[in-house]
Image (cartoon, grey):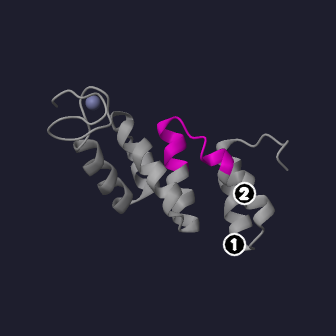
Amino acid sequence: MDSINYTFAESLDLLRIAHKYCMDSFERPAVKKLQGASTLPEYAELMVASQLTSSDAMYAQALEGLARNWRSMSLDLAQRIGVKALFEAANRFGAQCYHCNYGNYPICASCKTYR
Ligand SMILES: [Zn+2]
């Protein structure tokens, strides 16, 4: 199972089925793949996966990634992740440091500069 290299989209499909039928051995590698997200579309898939499985950890990671890549958000992806996630990602983006995209107002805890 681990040796098969699924795409992001395939991993989400796999997770959907594995979660529905409680097939942990299939669910785990799919989750692992999705947690390797690094682009906005991948974070959107991770968000959908977190919604499917009610995973707080995946949701938090996806939200972070969506906020960091907020400027590339498209209508397609927005519709895919839904209003709640979109709203929370927008709020998170608004709270980010302009310099490093991590810390918050008024002094960034990450890069130590003022926003
Ligand atoms: Zn910063």
Image spot of residue 27 (x, y percent)? 72, 60
Residue at position x 70%, y 52% from top? 30
Magenta portion: prevailing SS class: helix
> Could you tell me residue 85's position as x and y percent?
38, 57
Q: Considering the numbered disc 2 on the image, is that residue within a helix, a strand or a loop?
A: helix
Q: Position of residue 82 (x, y in %)?
A: 40, 59
Q: Quadrant of ligand 1?
A: top left
Q: Which mark is residue 20?
A: 1
Residue at disc 1, secondary structure: helix
Say which residue label 2 marks. Answer: 28
In front: 50, or 17?
A: 50
Q: Residue at x 22, y 43 (%)?
A: 94
Specify the amino acid type for callout 1. Answer: Lys
Task: Give the residue type at disc 2.
Answer: Arg
Q: Please state if 42 lies on the left or on the right of 33 as rendered.
A: left
**Label 2 to label 1: alpha-carbon separation:** 13 Å
- The answer to whether residue 96 is above or below residue 84 is above
**Count of numbered labels shown in the rendering:** 2
**Which residue shows up at 47% across the image and 54% down it?**
80
Q: Residues within 10 Å of mark 1 (few under 14, many from 20)?
A: few
Residue 42 as seen in the image, left or right of residue 95: right
Magenta segment: 32-45
The C terminus - image quarter: top left
